[in-house]
Image (tube, rainbow, N blue to C red):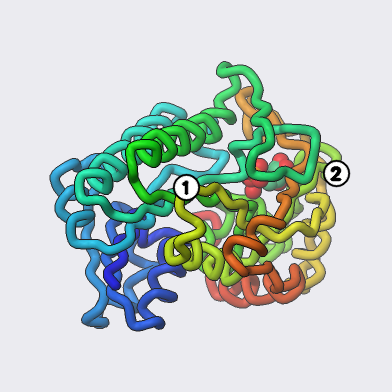
Amino acid sequence: MKILITGGAGFLGSHLGDTFLARGDQVICMDLGSIAKVQHNFNNPNFVYVRDSVLNDAMVDSLVSQADVVYHMAAVVGVEFYVDDPYNVLNININGTQTVLRAAYKYGKRVVFTSTSEVYGRNPKVPWAEDDDRVLGSTRIDRWCYSTSKAAGEHFCFGYHKMGLPVTVVRYFNVYGPRLDALDRGRVITIFLGQALRDDPITVVGDGMQTRCFTYVTDAIKATVEAGLRDEAIGEICNIGNDLEIPIKDIAEAVVRLSGSKSEIHYVPQEQIYGNSYEDVPRRVPDVTKMHRLLGVSADVTLEEGLKATIDYFKPAKSSAGE
Ligand code: UDP
């Protein structure tokens, strides 16, 4: 099969590409960002890298026409971007998704749209099943622009599905592992890890009792592959996550312990990290019943195993941390 992955040079896209290549499939990776996560595939005859934007209609049209399955993963992601550059988040995530879906509809190609647990916002009733409510704050709080952009993408998916497009939506819950962002950037694991590897204070926002469910990348990728292959998944939304709920302060402690760091844990007001345009999600937990039933996958990698592998990957980067 020929698989087109938009955002194929990113964290999840690069792992997904590796997995399809290992199965013997062909992968077209379309991305604008750094090639660091896919460079190892450049000599593989089954791998094609196209450096372009999902906003380029003509290129998207041409690549989609060649593919059997399209994974649309290109997006602007990371809380720092939601609060710093909401225009870019909304523009790329909403308009890029329309470009991909338009082409897929034209050629009748199967699409997997990678969405997010952010879609549920801060709905207090956890765990969240796929049809549960979205509970968001004001549009003056930039943090919610990502959730809104992905939800708009989902609506477009289901709009096209009504017209006959075979599409599946998956929602990830805090996926982590090797190649996640860069130290000190992006998401909490890489931020804490950068601090821990330098023995700097770990910046836990608030009291650290807010929770997340951390999903190791290999588990997330297994489910993502199935979402694009199983006929039963067409027209469906599926959470992809581990349902072990962990307070952020426990993650800070685990990162310190497993990396052998001397860092102290500091509790800091959220404004110090994100300014006034941020609102935290107090609890985030997936209902994974559908993932087991529909995709036949369960998230088995423990936090200890996953964090160790992530630390091993990032340790050599310690000296360049913060650059
Ligand atoms: N967080 C933290 N310290 C940091 C960065 C993040 O305590 O330096 C917290 C953040 O407030 C949130 C959780 O870690 O409760 C996860 O944040 P992340 O940015 O990874 O993404 P989110 O899950 O909120 O989308």
Using the numbered discs, state the Cα–Cα distance from disc 2 to disc 1 in whole angstroms: 36 Å
Q: What residue type is labelled 2?
A: Met
Q: Earlier in the sequence, mark 2 or mark 1?
A: 2
Residue toward you, 219 or 237 = 237
Judged from the image, the secondary structure of the residue bearing numbered disc 1 is: loop
Where residue 123 sits: x, y (%)? Answer: 73, 32
Where residue 154 sits: x, y (%)? Answer: 47, 38
Name the residue carrying label 2: 209
Q: What residue type is labelled 1?
A: Gly
Q: Residue 235 carries which label?
A: 1
Q: Is residue 89 visible?
A: no
Measured along the vertical axis of the image, is residue 88 above or below residue 112? above
Write down which quadrant ligand 1 falls in.
top right
Residue toward you, 74 or 277 = 74
Q: Taking 62 as reference, is 124 left or right?
A: right
Where residue 178 sits: x, y (%)? Answer: 55, 69
Residue toward you, 240 or 18 = 240
Query: For residue 70, what is the image quadrant?
Result: bottom left
Residue toward you, 258 or 292 = 292
Measured along the vertical axis of the image, is residue 155 above or below residue 196? above
Q: Residue at x 65, y 62 (%)?
A: 293
Q: Is residue 176 visible?
A: yes
